[in-house]
Image (cartoon, helix red, strand yellow):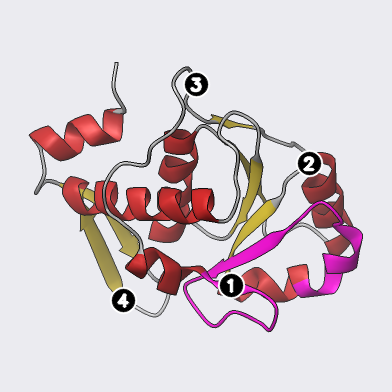
């Protein structure tokens, strides 16, 4: 069976898939076709930054948003493990989850990037910090610019790679 998002994008291209009602009153929407293209773009960015299908883990942190929906889909498409990180955790707790999960990439909403600035020294395995929906602090990547420049075509992953999974930490 193919990727379920790809199937919806082919059969219901213009149907509304995601509505993101931001706290400032901004309303963002994506159709299934747009969600597919944006998820593919992020998947290409992840692959270009060295994620290894079937092996890598990516921590994502932020409030519900289109950015997080993109990550969930991109991770599944390239066969990596997505690790949701509660943005309400203390620095110590966030460092523990990120390090313990063996994540090599952090994908974070710009609002919560300062936490990762503070705990960077405690995360020796993390190779890249990708910041979405805002300004990336120094030494972190503005992933929105990379997504905009990436291909909307489905990413190529080696045969036999299972769809990505999710690793959940509870409190």
Q: Nearer the viewer, residue 161 or 136?
A: 161
- Secondary-structure class at tag 3: loop
**CB atoms at circles 1 and 2 under 8 Å apart?**
no
Earlier sequence position, callout 3 versus callout 2: 2
**CB atoms at circles 3 and 4 under 8 Å apart?**
no
**Which of the labelled discs sits on residue 26, or is there none?**
4
Residue 51 is situated, as x and y percent measured from the top left of the image, at 60, 45
* Magenta stretch contains residue 128: yes
Q: What residue is pinned by disc 3?
A: 162
- Secondary-structure class at tag 4: loop
Q: How many marks?
A: 4
Q: What residue is pinned by disc 2?
A: 102
**CB atoms at circles 1 and 4 under 8 Å apart?**
no
**CB atoms at circles 3 and 2 under 8 Å apart?**
no
- Whole-angstrom CA distance, mark 3 to mark 2, is 19 Å
Residue 65 seen anywhere in this rendered image of the structure: no
Earlier sequence position, callout 1 versus callout 4: 4
Q: What residue is pinned by disc 1?
A: 141
- Secondary-structure class at tag 1: strand
Q: Nearer the viewer, residue 163 or 98?
A: 163
Q: Pointer 3: residues within 10 angstroms few (<14), some, or many (20+)?
A: some
Q: What residue sits 31% from the left and 28% below the top?
A: 3
Q: Is residue 96 above or below residue 133?
A: above
**CB atoms at circles 1 and 3 under 8 Å apart?**
no
**Which of the labelled discs sits on residue 80, or is there none?**
none
The quadrant of the image that shows the N terminus is top left
- Whole-angstrom CA distance, mark 3 to mark 4, is 36 Å
* Residue stretch rendered in magenta on the structure: 117-142
Residue 115 is situated, as x and y percent measured from the top left of the image, at 76, 70
Q: What residue sits 9% from the left and 49% below the top?
A: 14
Residue 69 is situated, as x and y percent measured from the top left of the image, at 41, 49
């Amino acid at each position: 069976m193919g990727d379920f998002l790809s199937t919806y994008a082919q059969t219901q291209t213009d149907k509304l898939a995601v509505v993101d009602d931001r706290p400032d009153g901004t309303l963002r929407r994506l159709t299934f076709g747009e969600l597919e293209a944006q998820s593919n773009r992020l998947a290409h960015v992840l692959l270009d930054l060295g994620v290894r299908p079937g092996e890598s883990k990516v921590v994502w942190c932020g409030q519900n948003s289109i950015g997080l929906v993109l990550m969930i889909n991109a991770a599944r498409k390239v066969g990596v493990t997505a690790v949701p990180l509660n943005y309400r955790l203390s620095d110590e707790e966030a460092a523990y989850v990120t390090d313990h999960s063996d994540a090599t990439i952090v994908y974070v909403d710009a609002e919560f990037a300062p936490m990762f600035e503070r705990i960077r020294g405690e995360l020796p395995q993390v190779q890249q910090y990708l910041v979405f929906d805002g300004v990336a602090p120094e030494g972190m990547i503005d992933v929105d610019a990379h997504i905009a420049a990436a291909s909307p075509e489905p990413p190529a992953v080696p045969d036999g790679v299972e769809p990505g999974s999710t690793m959940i930490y509870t409190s």
